[in-house]
Image (cartoon, rainbow, N blue to C red):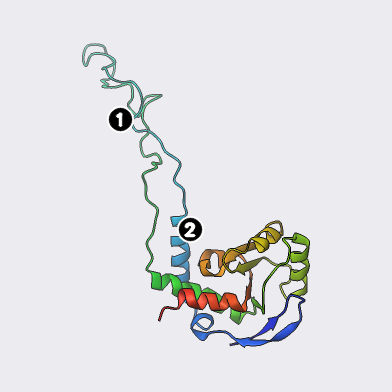
Amino acid sequence: MKVAVYNQSGKEAGEMTLPKEIFEVPMNADLVHQVLISQTANKRQVSAHTKDRGEVRGGGRKPWRQKGTGRARVGSIRSPLWKGGGVTGGPRNEKVYEKAIPTKMRRKALFMVLSEKAKNNLVVVLDTLEMETAKTKAMAAMMEKLPLAKASRLVTTLNSDKKINLATRNIKKTGVLEARNLNVADLLNYKYLLISKEGIKNIQETFIKE
C-alpha cells in the first residue's frame, strides 16, 4: 500500500510503500475486542475493599446467653446482619482482573488496527518529525497544515522526544506515544495516527521478529 509522505510544512514530499505485514492485515473484530478488553483489564486498579466479619473490630464475646432471654440466638455483634458488622459479598481488593493474552495475538490485533487506519486514510506519514523548540504554538500550526482535520490524533515519537512531548501535551484531542509502545487501546482512542518514516521503521524493528 502506497501513501503520500508530507514534510512539516504540509506539502507532499513523495510517497512510500507501507510494509504489508503491518498495514495490510485483514481485520478480525473479535480478536481486536479480546485484546482491548485484556489491556483495559490489566490497567484496572482495584481499590474498593470491604471488611468481612473476621476483619471488623469487636464481637469477641457472645452478646447474650443462648437460651432463656426470648431473643434470637446470636454469636457475635459483628454478624453481617448487625449494624457495624462485616459485609457479605462486597468488593475485595484481592480480586484479580488481569487477562493474559499471547504476544502473537496482541501483535496481530495491533497490525489489524493499523491496517484499518491505513485503509481509511487515517495514517499521516511525515518525512521527519522534529521540533527545534518545545512550543505548543509551533506544533499546533504544523498540524493544521497536515490532512488531520479537526479530529483526535496520536503523535508517535522516537525514544520519548521531550520537545515533542512538551509541545503537544496542551493541544486538545492529541496524544503522544513512542512508536515502540503502540497498542490497540491508544490507537482506538484516537482517529488519526501521525508518524514519521523512522517511526514506521521502528515499528518494524520492534514488532516484526525474524
Residue at 48% x, 64% y: name it: 36
Proximity of marks 2 and 1: CB atoms separated by less than 8 Å: no
**Where residue 180 sits in the image (x, y, percent)?**
52, 69
Q: Is residue 8 above or below residue 162?
A: below
* Residue at the spot of label 1: 54
Residue at 71% x, 80% y: name it: 6
Q: Which quadrant is home to the N terminus?
A: bottom right
Q: Is residue 62 left or right of residue 130?
A: left
Q: Residues within 10 Å of mark 1 (few under 14, many from 20)?
A: few
Q: Is residue 83 above or below residue 154?
A: above
**Where residue 156 sits in the image (x, y, percent)?**
61, 69
Q: Is residue 41 left or right of residue 125?
A: left
Residue at 45% x, 56% y: name it: 41
* Residue at the spot of label 2: 40
User: In this rendering, does residue 153 appear at all?
Assistant: yes
Residue at 52% x, 75% y: name it: 203
